[in-house]
Amino acid sequence: MTTPTTRGAMNWPLTLEFIRRELRLRWLGTFSGAAWALLQPLMQLAIYSYVFLYIFRARLPQEEFGELGFVPFLAVGLWPWTAFSEACLRAVSAIPDNAGLLGKVALPRPLLVLAPVVSGFLLHAVGFFAVIAILVLGGWLPWSWSILAVPFLLALLAVFALGLSWLLAALNVFVRDLSHLLGQLMLMLFFLTPVLYPRSLVPDALGPVADANPLALYIGLFRQVILGIGGYDWQHWLLAMVIALATAAAGWWVFQRLSPYFEDFL
C-alpha cells in the first residue's frame, strides 16, 4: 500500500544516500572507476575528431567562427550531451531495477530516478571541467570569466534531464519496450542536435525543427559562455530556465500520478 512517505516530499538525507550508492555501485565500484566519466567522452571526441578532421576534412565556417578549431567546438558540445543522454538512459529503468524496494520500504519514489541523474551529471561535470582546463592550459581556448556560468548551465540541463527522466521512467513501467527504444531515439536526437555541426549549417527548411529542440539551446549556451560564440541574450537564458523548470514540473506530476499503479505492472 502506498503511503504518504512514498509519494510525498523528498527525504533529503535518504536522497543523498541513494546518490552515494549510485556513485559507488555504478561508477566508483567499476574497474576503471570514476575515470570512465572522463575516458568515455575522450574516446568519443578522439573518434569524431579523426573522422571529421582527417576523413571528411570538416572545417568551421571562418566568417562565423574565425580561427576556432573544430576540436574545442566539438568538445564543448559533446560533454553536456553525453551527461544528458547517459542520465536519461540510466534513469529510464530505475523503477524496475528497484522493484524489490517498492511496497516494502517507505521511501520517496522519485528519488529512485533522481539518484542516477544527479550521480551521472556530477561525474561528467568533473570530466567536463578537466577538459575545459586542458583546452585553456593548452592554448586552444582563451580564459574568460563567462566560463564560471558553466555550473549553472549544467544544473539547468540536469533539471531538464531529471524532468524527462521522471516522465520516461514512469511510462517505462507500463511500456517496457520504451527502455530499449530510448537508445535508438537518443541516437537520432544526437544527430538532430548541433553537437557535430554548427546550427548555421542546418538547411533553412529544417530551421524551425532545429530551433524547437531544447538541447540545441543548451548546447548553444555552453558554446557561448566557453567559446564566446553565438548570439544568445537574456531572453534565451530565461527560456532555458523556463524549459528546465517546466519539464521538471511536468515529469514530477506524471510520475506522481502513475506511481500508485507501479506495483500492479512490475
Image (spheres, rainbow, N blue to C red):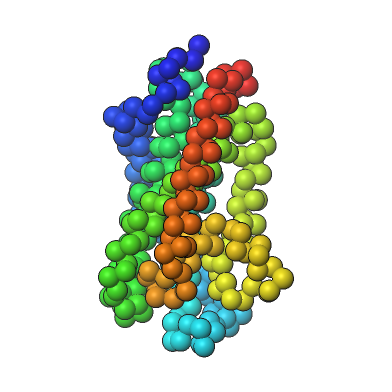
What is the residue that sits farthest to the right in this orientation? Answer: 205
Let me know if residue 30 appears in the view: no
Let me know if residue 247 appears in the view: yes
> Is 25 on the left-hand or right-hand side of 254?
left
Please say if 27 is above or below 143: above
Q: Residue at x 37, y 70 (%)?
A: 226
Please say if 194 is above or below 249: below
Q: Quadrant of residue 9?
A: top left
Report x, y in % for residue 5: 40, 19
What is the residue that sits farthest to the front in this orientation? Answer: 235
> Is 207 on the left-hand or right-hand side of 136?
right
> Is 43 on the left-hand or right-hand side of 57?
left
Please say if 250 is above or below 257: below
Q: What is the tally of numbered marks visible in this picture?
A: 0
Q: Residue at x 27, y 70 (%)?
A: 145
Q: Residue at x 58, y 38 (%)?
A: 168
Report x, y in % for residue 7: 45, 22
Report x, y in % for residue 196: 55, 69
Between 205 and 2, the one lying in front of the other is: 205
Quadrant where the C terminus sits is: top right
Between 13 and 26, the one lying in front of the other is: 13
Report x, y in % for residue 85: 52, 51
Q: Residue at x 57, y 72 (%)?
A: 199
Please say if 40 is above or below 75: above
What is the residue that sits farthest to the top in this orientation? Answer: 1
